[in-house]
Image: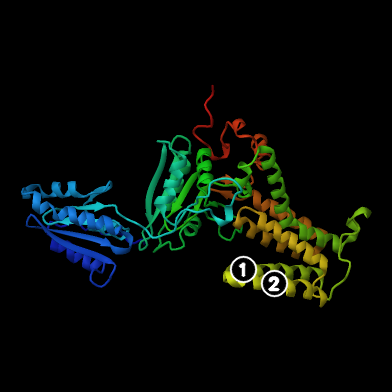
């Protein structure tokens, strides 16, 4: 059963409220729980805050304004109104329960309690530690904006709002986690996004029962999407505000999670993971060319190795003009096993590059090039053709815009190699049929994963294949069921 929160009403006795704070927040034992008690017009006023999450200069200015009340005011009966007018900040609200006040204080806000009053004033002066917006490493472009989402949810929604100054843009804040109380924001355009989609996402988030979501957006995804052991990504992540804003205009819904620099885009299809901002920063013809090259790279990352292995095992499948395909020299290890070893070697290098300190990465690269490259060929562990095709396949996976999709394709690639190595042509055909049926049956929030290919939509498929000029993209994708289908006004 989920743990129910008590509705402890704020007491008119400020001492009772202080005792509650000492018990619940650990005031006195936790050094970062700040507390000040002031005497203003002969009444006690207490201030609570978390030292690392509040702007110190604003706290000092607030204390200064409150102390000055003793010098300029004398009406003690109107002390609550006087104090409220001295709270020098743009966001102030009143709460009536201790639980809500404690949650707000732990979120980085200031709580002001007045003796004799059954409510507390909450002042939003939070100042989360973090970095400044910068271009994300995984979504770089040649031309375009260099800002990106950070770990601050307030900054992230502001970066999106800067690009969509529409009064119909909604940013609804929720809290998830019994202990972490992490802020989760749902963003959508009120007159475009489907109401059923919005309600479904809200219900899924509200139903989450967990202590905390310290892994942020990934935990949210696993609760919203019932993917089980499916390797393919059913949501899209982006760290670029321009990409996020573009999807909002299409009718998608975004989820921001505090402490995460990635926004979740819902719903998504397989082809969403093949898009990149660079295509829209170039001329349509150049963008189409880039898109074709990317599709070829993704295809190579999945099918190049099993196809080459199939032809190497059964040369009769090749026409005479392509008879050169296949290993020129037989190594000491079976070809299928060579490919598997080489694929795992690539993954070793990738993980080593992630965990190797930057000053040592160059040395690591030189060692890998010598040991896995030339020496492995000389001792007969790998044939040169295996190194070549495994390298091309690895490059194709790195060209894939979505990291999650590239990892999924690597696993599928390994299974294809095993099937072909065991059953040759029959294994390749079985693998293709099983993968196609698997992808056809996948749905992301009731959205077919292979749309617009299956079910087929000619107009949408044209937009997938070609980078259509923006003036000719007058309609939104029908798969998200937008309330307003036209992107531009009809003249």
Residue placed most toward the observer, 283 or 400: 283
The residue at the point 29 percent across, 56 percent down is 109
State the mark number for residue 353: 1
The secondary structure type at the circle numbered 2 is: helix
Q: How many marks?
A: 2
Q: Earlier in the sequence, mark 2 or mark 1?
A: 1
Whether residue 407 appears in this view of the structure is yes
Q: Is 287 on the left-hand or right-hand side of 486?
A: right
Task: Quote the CA–CA distance across marks 2 and 1.
Answer: 12 Å
Colour convention: rainbow
Q: Is 310 on the left-hand or right-hand side of 366?
A: right
Residue extending farthest bottom = 379
The secondary structure type at the circle numbered 1 is: helix
The residue at the point 28 percent across, 47 percent down is 91
Q: Quadrant of the C terminus?
A: top right
Q: Position of residue 100 (x, y in %)?
A: 27, 55
Residue, disc 2: 366
Q: Is 130 on the left-hand or right-hand side of 20?
A: right
Quarter of the image holding residue 370? bottom right
Whether residue 7 appears in this view of the structure is no
């Amino acid at each position: 059963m989920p743990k129910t929160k008590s509705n402890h009403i704020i007491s008119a006795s400020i001492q009772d409220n202080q005792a509650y704070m000492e018990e619940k927040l650990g005031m006195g034992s936790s050094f970062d729980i700040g507390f000040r008690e002031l005497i203003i017009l002969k009444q006690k006023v207490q201030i609570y805050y978390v030292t690392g999450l509040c702007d110190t200069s604003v706290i000092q200015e607030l204390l200064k304004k409150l102390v000055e009340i003793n010098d300029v005011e004398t009406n003690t009966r109107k002390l609550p109104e006087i104090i409220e007018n001295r709270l020098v900040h743009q966001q102030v609200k009143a709460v009536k329960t201790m639980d809500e006040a404690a949650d707000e204080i732990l979120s980085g806000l200031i709580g002001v309690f007045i003796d004799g009053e059954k409510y507390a004033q909450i002042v939003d002066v939070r100042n989360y530690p973090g970095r400044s917006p910068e271009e994300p490493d995984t979504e770089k472009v040649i031309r375009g904006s260099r800002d990106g989402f950070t770990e601050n949810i307030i900054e992230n929604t502001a970066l999106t709002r800067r690009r969509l100054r529409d009064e119909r843009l909604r940013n609804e804040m929720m809290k998830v986690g019994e202990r972490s109380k992490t802020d989760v924001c749902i963003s959508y355009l009120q007159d475009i996004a489907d109401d059923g989609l919005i309600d479904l996402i809200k219900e899924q988030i509200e139903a989450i029962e967990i202590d905390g979501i310290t892994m942020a957006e990934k935990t949210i995804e696993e609760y919203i999407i019932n993917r089980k052991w499916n390797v393919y990504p059913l949501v899209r992540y982006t760290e670029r505000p321009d990409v996020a804003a573009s999807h909002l205009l299409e009718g998608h819904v975004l989820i921001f999670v505090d402490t995460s620099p990635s926004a979740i885009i819902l719903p998504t299809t397989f082809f969403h993971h093949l898009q990149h901002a660079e295509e829209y920063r170039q001329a349509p013809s150049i963008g189409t060319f880039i898109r074709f090259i990317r599709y070829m790279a993704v295809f190579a990352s999945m099918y190049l190795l099993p196809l080459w292995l199939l032809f190497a095992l059964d040369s009769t499948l090749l026409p005479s003009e392509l008879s050169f395909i296949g290993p020129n020299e037989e190594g000491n290890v079976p070809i299928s096993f060579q490919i598997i070893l080489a694929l795992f070697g690539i993954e070793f290098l990738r993980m080593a590059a992630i965990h190797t300190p930057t000053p040592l990465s160059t040395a690591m690269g030189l060692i890998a090039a010598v040991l896995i490259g030339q020496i492995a060929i000389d001792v007969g562990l790998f044939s040169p053709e295996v190194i070549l095709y495994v390298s091309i396949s690895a490059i194709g996976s790195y060209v894939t815009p979505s990291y999650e999709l590239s990892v999924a394709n690597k696993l599928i690639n390994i299974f294809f190699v095993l099937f072909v190595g065991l059953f040759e042509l029959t294994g390749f055909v079985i693998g293709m049929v099983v993968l196609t049926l698997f992808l056809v049956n996948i749905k992301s929030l009731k959205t077919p994963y292979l749309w617009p290919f299956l079910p087929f939509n000619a107009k949408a498929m044209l937009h997938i294949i070609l980078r259509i000029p923006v003036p000719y993209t007058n309609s939104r994708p029908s798969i998200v069921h937008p309330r307003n289908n036209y992107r531009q006004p009809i003249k």
